[in-house]
Structures are given as C-alpha cells and as structure tokens.
Image (tube, rainbow, N blue to C red):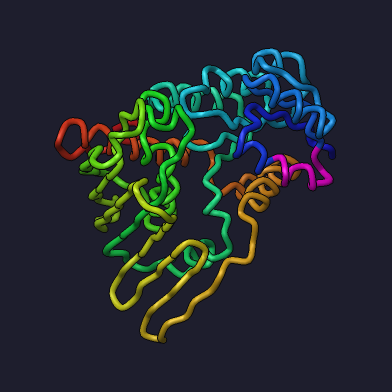
Amino acid sequence: MSVRVGMIGVGGIGQHHLKGLLTDERVKVVAVCDVNQVAAAETAERIGAHGYTSWRELVEVEKLDALFVCVPPFAHEEIEESAAAKGIHLFVEKPIGLDIQKVNKKQEAIEKAGIITATGYCLRYLDIVQEAKVYLEGKSIALVRGHYLTKFVTTPWWREMGKSGGQLVEQATHTLDMMRFLAGDIEKVYAQMALLVSRDIPNIDIPDVTSISMVFQSGALGHLDTCFIQPDHRTNVEILGKDFRVMIDGKQLSIIDEQGARTKESTVDMYVEQDRAFITAIVTGDRSLILSPYESARKTLEVTLAANQSAQEGKPVTILRKGE
C-alpha cells in the first residue's frame, strides 16, 4: 500500500517530518502547502510534489490518505475539520491550538469521521521513555518534578501570547506532556508567571519565567519550572516514589532504587519513530501504535491553558473532564 501524504507547513518542524517520510518506502508525499510561496515552491520542486499556498485548495484538490498539519498554534483555522470530513488521517503538530472550545469541536469532527490521528509529542517515542513507562507500571508515584530551561526563540510570532500561547503552551508542553504520560492525568494547577528580564525584546508579551504546582488525579504532587533566559538548553523529568526514582534528563534515563543505580542513553530518532508508527497504523489499522492521539494532546493543551488562566487569575484552577 502506498500512503499518499500531504503536508501543510514546511518550516522547521515540517522539514523534520519530510526528512523521515521521504525515506519511508510506503509513503508518497504528493503535496505541500505553506503561506510562504517561495518555501512551498522550493520544497515541492525538491521532493517532486504539488505546491500550494492555500490549505483549502490542497485538501479539496488532492486525493490524500494522510495529512501532516505543521502550522503555528494560531493558524489551524478549520484544517482538521475539513480533512476529517474527507476521511483523511491526521498528524497534527503540538500545540494543537490555543482555544480549548475550538479544539473540542475538532475532536468531535475527528471522532465522527473515525480517522486515525497522531500528534507531535515525539518524546513519547524515545526508547528510554518506553522503558520508564514499563518500569513505573503498578508503582505508586508520590512526586513529579520537571523543568524546561532554554534560550529565547527568535521567531516573531512566538513572543506574542495571542499567537503562541506562551512558552508553556508552545514549547515546554513537551515536558508537561511527559509528566502526564508517565504519571497520569492532572486535575489541578496553580501557576506563577512573569516577564522579568526580557522586556528589551520588541513586541514581547509572554512570561519569561514560569513556575507551576499541580495535583495529579492519582493524588501525586508535581512541579514544573520553565524559562527562556538561559544560554543553554536543559530538560528533565523526575518521578519519585517510595524507594525509587526515575529520571529522564534530555535523552538519558536513570533509575535509582533498592537494586542500585543504572543509566541508559536513547538510541532512536524520535521523529522517525513517531512518523513510522503513524504510517504503520494507517497501513495496518492498529491504532495502539499511536502513543499520542489527538485526544491525549487535547488533554495536555487543557492543562497548559489552565496554567495560563491560573497565572492570570492568581488562584488554582481545577481541570474538569468531559461530562463533569
């Protein structure tokens, strides 16, 4: 089976996906789209695909099996609903939006269509994360700690809250999602955010430092710190329980328990792993291969948006699930 793929957005993350997709013998990338006409045309010519600047035209004209949506968080419009209505399977990059009500409507369209979905939480596909997940099965988790400390992103829209949602929603969402993946859903957040030392950046209105306390549905407590004021890049998640600690520091796993300490480095390309899993799910119909379907990404977005709300209101926010 040849999977006919389209891609909307051929910037940095889109090119990451294309690199892997073009080496998958099961895939034919037939169309690409970008609001940047030059980028769309150059990419289309390089890979032998049709180029578009209108996503609506691409979805209407092309016969697709799957569509990769690699647009900024403010630019989703009705892409997912339009593709779902045509039965096109969807890979949607994180974050999947900025408005939870709009994302809920997209989720409803996806469920109605019955299509396969995956999202860009690539860290879940690291071999060391899978090993940590297996180790934690059946264990009682008491404390979850995380951080995402890095440099400023110079992309103009990233510094605007109305376009990116801020660092937590757009970037550190990877770390929060990892905390969810390993320790379960989060039911309450209390966040502090401030713009302290980056006011010299033109047009900036997002916080440069963030600190979030959270309560997991299991009762475990958690904490996440993020910033973009550092000269380097560091990410970390720690899961602690009685007599054990699991730590994922970048691409290294450490497990410390009564048997001693051991470490392991990841050996896989997470982008390739997640894209191949999505294509295999389409070919075989095995949805269990998808580690982050749209509904899971919706839950991660819900937590990050609740944290933004908490910081704005100055009080804890409880996250209500569907039907609650």
Instruction: Tell me, yes or no, whether the highlighted magenta stretch contains residue 23.
Output: yes
Q: Say which quadrant the N terminus sits in.
A: top right
Question: Residue 289 location, x and y as percent?
Answer: 63, 50
How many labels sit on residues?
0
In this rendering, the answer to whether 109 lies above or below 46 is above
Locate residue 34 relative to residue 97 in the image: left or right. Answer: right
Residue nearer the viewer, 166 or 130: 166
Q: In the visual, does 198 lie left or right of 237?
A: left
Q: Position of residue 286 (x, y in %)?
A: 67, 46
Please identify the quarter of the rendering in which residue 68 is found: top right
Relative image position of residue 8 (x, y in whole percent) = 64, 26
Determine the residue located farthest toward the left in the rendered image.
Answer: 315
Q: Position of residue 49 (x, y in %)?
A: 81, 27
Measured along the vertical axis of the image, is residue 105 above or below residue 271? above
Q: Which residues are magenta?
A: 18-27
Residue 210 appears anywhere in the view: yes
| Above or below, 135 relative to 201 | below
Residue shown at the point (31%, 29%) measured from the top left? 205
Residue toward you, 229 or 176:
229
Q: Residue at x 52, y 36 (%)?
A: 294
Q: Foreground residue, 86 or 276?
A: 276
Quadrant placement of the C terminus: top left
87 on left or right of 314: right
| Residue furthest out toward the bottom | 259
Residue 262 within the magenta-colored segment of the rendering: no
* Residue 306 visible in the current orientation: no
Q: Residue at x 36, y 85 (%)?
A: 258
